[in-house]
Amino acid sequence: MITIVSSSLNSESNSRLLALEAKRVLESEGHAVTWLDLRDLPLPLCDGGAAYGHPNVAIAGKMLADADAVIVATAIYNYDGNAAVKNLIELTGASWENKPVGFLCAAGGLSSYMSIMSLANSLMLDFRSVIVPRFVYATGSDFDADRISSADVVRRTADLARATARFGSALKAA
């Protein structure tokens, strides 16, 4: 099973469009997918204490723990993944252990291309996540209203989804 995390809280999120495309591809190819949309599952801010006991944290943690692999769709802000996905990781840390993780990134411009690496490094070092060595980085020009307008981004999203599924299957078999 692959859990897809749509981390944007923005109702007009481009990263959510990437996540929905990955979901479409995986489901059309017969993969079991769970959908974790942080707009639908509000999480408390990580406070190092009481927040860990929130019922939505338990739900999110179980969805991630049960996954063979995770795809994270995030907007890029201030040269990093958004605050909501970082909060999710803080709240559910152990659920990420030894999981393949792929990234779908939506950003305003081209200059933050490598910005997802700080989040990837954190997952690798803190939770021994296996980072899928391909990710999607799309900018505003790759979208048109409520759809992905770039055929290249659609193709790369499908490639990322398939690669993450392969990594998840291989790691589970091992």
Image: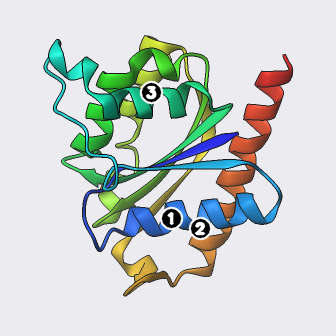
- At label 2, which amino acid type do we have? Glu
The answer to whether 16 appears left or right of 156 in the picture is: left
Estimate the x, y position of residue 84 in percent, counting from the top left. Answer: 26, 43
Whether residues under marks 1 and 3 lie with C-beta atoms below 8 angstroms apart, the answer is: no
Specify few, some or many for label 3: CA neighbours under 10 Å numbering under 14, 14-19, or 20 or more: many
Q: Which residue is mark 1?
A: 18
Q: Is residue 143 above or below residue 8?
A: below
* Nearer-N-terminus badge (1/3): 1
Cα distance between the residues tagged 2 and 1: 5 Å
Mark 1 Cα within 10 Å, few/some/many (few <14, many 20+)? many
Give SS at disc 1.
Answer: helix
State the residue in front, 153 or 12.
12
Q: Which residue is mark 2?
A: 21
Question: Residue 94, how many percent across, how many down?
Answer: 46, 14
Reading the chain from its start, which is encountered first: label 2 or label 3?
2
Q: Is 173 left, or right, of 46 in this rendering?
A: right
Q: Residue at x 50, y 65 (%)?
A: 18
Q: Which residue is mark 3?
A: 61
Rendered image quadrant of residue 154: bottom right
- In which quadrant of the rendered image does the N terminus lie? top right
Q: Quadrant of residue 166?
A: top right
Q: Is 111 rendered above or below residue 152?
A: above
Q: Is residue 21 visible?
A: yes
Task: Please give the label number shown on residue 102.
Answer: none
Residue drawn at point x = 35 percent, y = 63 percent: 110
> Total of numbered circles in the picture?
3
